[in-house]
Amino acid sequence: MVTTSESLSISVATPSDLQAIEPAWWRLLHHQQGLDYRGSERELKTQINSERVRRFLDSRVRQGRLLIARFEGELVGLCTFSPDGFILDAPIQVWEIADVWVEPHARRRGFATAMVRECEHECRMRGADEVRLTVYALNDEALGLYQSLGYDVTSYTLSRNVGSEN
């Protein structure tokens, strides 16, 4: 556990945290939907059902790959980290930080910075030589944060909607 102040603690989530994590995860998903629109809020609930979300979160917690930030006892942030499974024969071990989320009322207080730094530490302790993360192109605040932490843009992901073409 890292404590950046008397009131902020960041730790790897435990099963007892799941009840507080799930509602925050749904808020994260709704926020991401605004950055990468793929359907209405009703469609989001239909496509990603509650049981699937619970299984995913439970898996991340059991693997020790989900961090939470608590401020004065309240869960105010979360993020995940895992080995990058796309680089098969790399001479280095790469890990990925994903889903960095801070509750809107708790933003701009250094919580995301502290979580990213703790994720980097966790990844390093598990053998990572390099850490990568992904940010939505429309998420200027997050992009600015990551660049201020020393992350460089190394690739672009492009998309094109072809579903409505004849």
Image (cartoon, grey):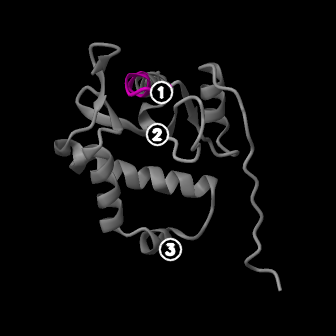
Q: Is residue 157 above or below residue 121?
A: below
Q: Residue at the bottom extreme?
A: 166
> For the point 36% across and 48% down, which residue is it?
24
Residue bearing the label numbered 1: 128
* 109 is within the stretch colored magenta: no
Judge left or right: residue 25 versus residue 89. left
Q: Quadrant of the C terminus?
A: bottom right
Residue 112 pos. (x, y %): 47, 28
Q: Quick one: label 2, few (<14), some, or many (20+) residues within 10 Å?
A: some
Q: Is residue 59 above or below residue 119?
A: below
Q: Main secondary structure of the magenta part?
A: helix
Sequence-wise first label, 3 or 1: 3
What stretch of residues is rendered in magenta? 121-128
What amino acid type is highlighted by mark number 1? Ala
Residue bearing the label numbered 3: 43
Judge whether residue 102 can be spotted in this image: no
What amino acid type is highlighted by mark number 2? Pro
- Secondary structure of residue under mark 2: strand
- Secondary structure of residue under mark 3: helix
Sequence-wise first label, 2 or 1: 2
Residue bearing the label numbered 2: 83
What amino acid type is highlighted by mark number 3? Glu
